[in-house]
Image (cartoon, grey):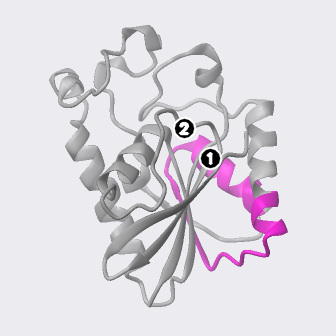
Amino acid sequence: MKKTLYLMRHGQTLFNLQHKIQGWCDSPLTELGQEQARFAGLYFENNKIQIDHAYASTSERACDTLELVTGGRIPYTRLKGLKEWNFGVFEGKDECLNPPLPYGDFFKQFGGETQEELQLRMVRTLLDVMKIEDHHVVLAVSHGGACANFVRYWEQYNKVQYQKGIKNCTIFRFTYEDEKFCLEEIIVNS
């Protein structure tokens, strides 16, 4: 049975504005970030999309985004598996300290995660969510690096190819069937 997953990046945060590495540390949504989330909510409303279950990373920026997108009308579950890449001691530092892409194993030596660890964490978490019988149309709010690595994992099945750089409140629409995800559409709302 085909199901639908809407995977979304959170709205703009103070650290996004200040060009700081966020990862597992957190900063609040800016006014623009709040507007982006409400605008993303219009996508679901205008297209009459009925979300039956919602999930967010445990980070405040993701939870706040989800609450704004849904107008607080849908209960949701917070999942650690949807958190951003753990950047170790680089958390909260200036983005200019990031190594060139791809990061690969770089952050592991500084107490963070490898790219593979992040990717597998996201894949396991969202597979577990979508395997639940009554989950047919799911919204999950996560983070830029986490979303990008989830999309890359399913590259061979995707109908739409991901381009580098994910704007705040971008929505990825996947179909899910036979324990595989296929990216069908990328909705850029910012």
Quarter of the image for residue 36 reads: top right
The boundaries of the magenta stretch are 42-70
Quarter in which the C terminus is drawn: top right
Quarter of the image for residue 14 reads: top right
- Horizontal and vertical percent for residue 40? 75, 52
Residue 1 located left or right of residue 10: left
Give the residue number, with chain letter if any, for mark 1.
170
Residue 79 located left or right of residue 19: left
Q: What residue is drawn where x is 70% and y is 71%?
A: 74
Q: Amino acid at mark 2?
A: Ile
Contact between labelled residues 1 and 2, with CB atoms less than 8 Å apart: yes
Vertical position of residue 143 compared to residue 151: above or below: above
- Horizontal and vertical percent for residue 66? 66, 55
Q: Amino acid at mark 1?
A: Thr
Give the residue number, with chain letter if any, for mark 2.
166
Vertical position of residue 186 compared to residue 4: above or below: above
Residue 58 lies in the magenta stretch: yes
